[in-house]
Image: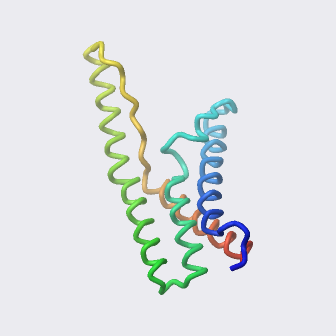
Amino acid sequence: MDAIISPYLIAIALGWIVAQGLKYVFAVVRTGKIGNLRQLYLSGNMPSAHSATVVALATTIGLYEGLDSALFGIAALFAAIVMYDAIMVRRSTGEQGVAIQQLIKTTHSKITLPRAAKGHTPVEVIVGMVLGVVIGIVVFFATK
């Protein structure tokens, strides 16, 4: 590997940029509004940028180092933990945040509404995972 820039860092950056860019595109298609630039950095929605990023990294590692390497095993475990967290932990805390917001509104409390960070649905994570595999393969062949 004689790349000037690490293909692993390229995979990470592309995974994040492409997924966040697609979130913006999907939001524009869904709402018809082009000014919602917050989609470029907010968590949640389609596709999961966390999943795309970690899977792009794991795919690149697997292709360069081998699917039987210890480093790929670690990257695959890391990706699985991140994707599990996006669906199970972050999603449930986001739902709890929405419930807390509703309670505050219903009771007309003076408490400032907290932000409810969204997690991901399984479909959003799967799409992010597929996007990450594609990005990892592209990065591998582009930097080989």
For the C terminus, the quadrant is bottom right
Q: Nearer the viewer, residue 77 or 128?
A: 77
Residue 39 position within the rendered picture, expressed as x and y whole percent measured from the top left: 59, 39
Residue at 30% in and 17% down: 111
Q: Nearer the viewer, residue 96 or 29?
A: 96
Residue 13 position within the rendered picture, expressed as x and y whole percent measured from the top left: 62, 57
For the N terminus, the quadrant is bottom right
Vertical placement of residue 29 versus 33, above or below: below
Residue 7 position within the rendered picture, expressed as x and y whole percent measured from the top left: 65, 69
Q: Nearer the viewer, residue 10 or 141?
A: 10
Number of callouts in the render?
A: 0
Vertical placement of residue 51 versus 109, above or below: below
Residue at 67% in and 74% down: 140
Residue at 48% in and 44% down: 44
Residue at 59% in and 73% down: 60
- Horizontal side, residue 57 vs residue 78: left or right: right
Type of colouring: rainbow
Residue 66 position within the rendered picture, expressed as x and y whole percent measured from the top left: 54, 85
Vertical placement of residue 118 versus 111, above or below: below
Vertical placement of residue 19 versus 35, above or below: below
- Horizontal side, residue 42 vs residue 84: left or right: right
Residue 112 occupies quadrant: top left
